[in-house]
Image (cartoon, rainbow, N blue to C red):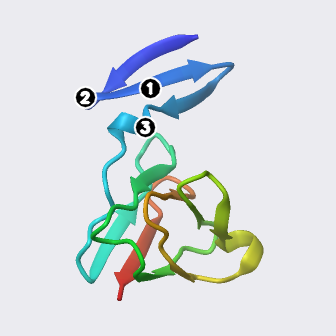
Amino acid sequence: MNFYNVNHKEYLRIDGQSYISEDAIQPIYEGNSSFCTIPSNGQAVWYKINEKSANRVMTVEAPVRGGFAVYDAKGKVVNFSKASNNHSVVLPEGGMIVFGGNEGDVFKINLK
């Protein structure tokens, strides 16, 4: 096991896999539109769902090879876009969102 920090965020590496500390995950931007870009290291991008974004419909324009998953507060998958082919979902309060894809992939996010 190896703990390390990048940009003031704590990570854990085990057997070549990296995990981010939940404390380092920021809430998703609660405005009507935003973008998420997969960083140069190719790691997935996580967001928390807080009271400002909860119960709103999130619609995502994802790159062909990219996808996203939404989890409820108990960690149950609410939507996994690659499996469901559904790119709109109501965000559950206290849940999490993860965007994954290739380096430089851009996701266009709309909240209503």
Sequence-wise, the earlier of marks 2 and 3 is 2
Q: Mark 3 points at which residue?
A: 22
User: Is disc 2 surrounded by few (<14), some (14 to 19) or many (20+) residues within 10 Å?
Assistant: few
**Dot 1 amino acid type:** Tyr
Question: Where does label 2 land, which residue?
Answer: 8
Q: How many labels does the image show?
A: 3
Residue 58 has which mark?
none
* Label 3 environment density (alpha carbons within 10 Å; few <14, some 14–19, many ≥20): some
In the rendered view, tell whether residue 106 sits above or below residue 100. Answer: below
Label 3: which secondary element: helix
Alpha carbons under labels 2 and 3: distance apart: 13 Å
Of residues 49 and 83, the one nearer the viewer is 49
SS state under label 2:
loop
Image coordinates of residue 20 in percent, x first then y, are: 46, 34
Q: Categorize mark 1 by other alpha carbons within 10 Å: few (<14), some (14-19), many (20+).
A: some
| Residue identified by numbered label 1 | 11
| Nearest to viewer (mark 3 / mark 1) | 3
